[in-house]
Image (cartoon, helix red, strand yellow):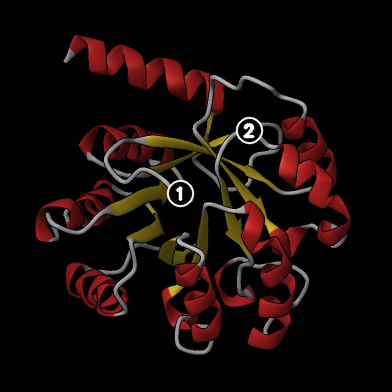
Amino acid sequence: MSIPLNKANIVVPVTNSAELKQIARHSNPTAWDLVEIRVDRIPDIHQLIPEISSVVAPIILTCRHPDEGGFNDMHSPEQRQSILAPLIPHAAAIDIEIASAEEMHEMVHVAREASLTVILSFHDFTTTPNNDQLKVITEKGIAIEPDLVKIATTTDRPEQLCNLLSLFSRFPNQPLALMGMGKLGMASRLIAAQSGSVLNYAAWGEVSAPGQWPADEFRDVIERASANG
């Protein structure tokens, strides 16, 4: 199983067991296309496999490194891989940081063998790197040959938002997911979705990153913008 790379998918992150159980009870979700399970934030995740199996939408597995917003002190690649491995049969994609790709290469290989979409990501919760830095980060991710590169940065100023969105024109042949956080986070996510961002994160329940729209509102705004375009 894999996720579509030719559309603006709305993704809702699940960050606790209560949210996962609620998502699993939705038999016909309309506000989202994909569900991201933040494995690093759910200590009892392996006890919730029946709920994971009941989720209707394709699932992205994420076990985030603490340096990029991860929880529960999961620095060890062996620890993260041991948590992720039993969940692979229930997923459509896996998200691993560009900075962790080398030490997590076994997990990347397992995901590819299972025909999962491999997402390599970068997160900056303080600022947006300049254009040259963003180019280097993105090229480093592309060099590992993922299906999708995801870049999330803090966009408090217009020039930061412009730098982030410029990646669409700099890498026109690479599927990208771009999103801003901070003061211009909501604007960044709407523009990115309209510009070709494959993954567009929105909140269902608890907001997991600054700048997220409520999922149902985000779906409505995107559809109305597309109709007017």
First along the sequence among labels 1 and 2: 2
Marker disc for residue 153: none
Q: Nearer the viewer, residue 179 or 57?
A: 57
Snapshot quadrant of residue 112:
bottom left
Counting from the top left corner in percent of width and height, residue 70 is at: 65, 67
| Left or right of 156, for residue 54 | right
Marker disc for residue 181: 1
Snapshot quadrant of residue 43:
bottom right
| Left or right of 193, for residue 82 | right
Q: Residues within 10 Å of mark 2 (few under 14, many from 20)?
A: some
Counting from the top left corner in percent of width and height, residue 222 is at: 35, 22
Q: Residue at x 27, y 17 (%)?
A: 225
| Left or right of 47, for residue 20 | left
Q: How many marks?
A: 2
Amino acid of disc 1: Met
Q: Nearer the viewer, residue 65 or 24?
A: 24
Amino acid of disc 2: Val
Q: Residue at x 50, y 63 (%)?
A: 95
- Is there any visible trace of residue 76 in the rendered image? no
Q: Residue at x 63, y 46 (%)?
A: 208
Counting from the top left corner in percent of width and height, residue 214 is at: 56, 27
Q: Residue at x 79, y 31 (%)?
A: 22
Residue that badge 2 annotates: 56
Judge depth for marks 1 and 2 and give the one in front: 2
Q: Secondary structure at mark 1?
A: strand
Which image quarter holds the C terminus?
Answer: top left
Counting from the top left corner in percent of width and height, residue 94 is at: 52, 62
